[in-house]
Amino acid sequence: MPSTLERWLKSLLVLLSLSTTTLFFGVLILSLVPVKFALKKTPFDRRVKEALFGLARSWIYFNNWVYTGLYQVEWRIIGHTNLKPEGQYLLISNHVSSADILAIFVLA
């Protein structure tokens, strides 16, 4: 079991990472939103939308990398156990911990 200091340091790293990446990617995304509206219904609209989705995915992937590097994520599947990796499923979080959303990002 990790020590209290180790848990605090990991939590601090996750908080710092989330804050930094949210600020970084948030500024990039917010700066592209006016461009998307300005280029609406033009040939560039789709490219700007893809860039926005790419930035959002990069934010998720980077945070997943940090989170899974620091914590071991465990899954408990109740009910239907014949789930297929290529299938589409609805993920629901009960928000028991602050890590629920990050855990869902790992699955997404």
Image (cartoon, helix red, strand yellow):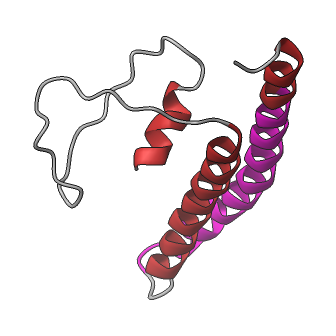
Left or right side of 19 for 91: left
- First to last magenta residue range: 12-41
Which residue is at the front of the view, 13 or 21? 13
Dominant secondary structure of the residues highlighted in magenta in the image: helix
Q: Residue furthest bottom?
A: 43
Which residue is at the front of the view, 94 or 43? 94
Which residue is at the front of the view, 36 or 14? 14
Q: Is residue 47 above or below residue 49?
A: below
Q: Quadrant of residue 89?
A: top left
Q: Where does the image place residue 36, in percent across and percent down from the top left?
A: 56, 68
Kindly identify the residue that appears in the image at 32 percent across and 27 percent down.
76
Task: Look at the image and tell me in which quarter the N terminus lies.
Answer: top right
Left or right side of 28 for 33: left
Left or right side of 101 for 61: right
Q: Where does the image place residue 87, in percent across and percent down from the top left?
A: 17, 55
Kindly identify the residue that appears in the image at 44 percent across and 88 percent down.
43
Kindly identify the residue that appears in the image at 54 percent across and 60 percent down.
57
Residue 15 within the magenta-colored segment of the rendering: yes
Residue 74 within the magenta-colored segment of the rendering: no
Q: Quadrant of residue 82?
A: top left
Q: Is residue 85 above or below residue 95?
A: below
Q: Where does the image place residue 41, in percent across and percent down from the top left?
A: 41, 77
Kindly identify the residue that appears in the image at 67 percent across and 58 percent down.
29
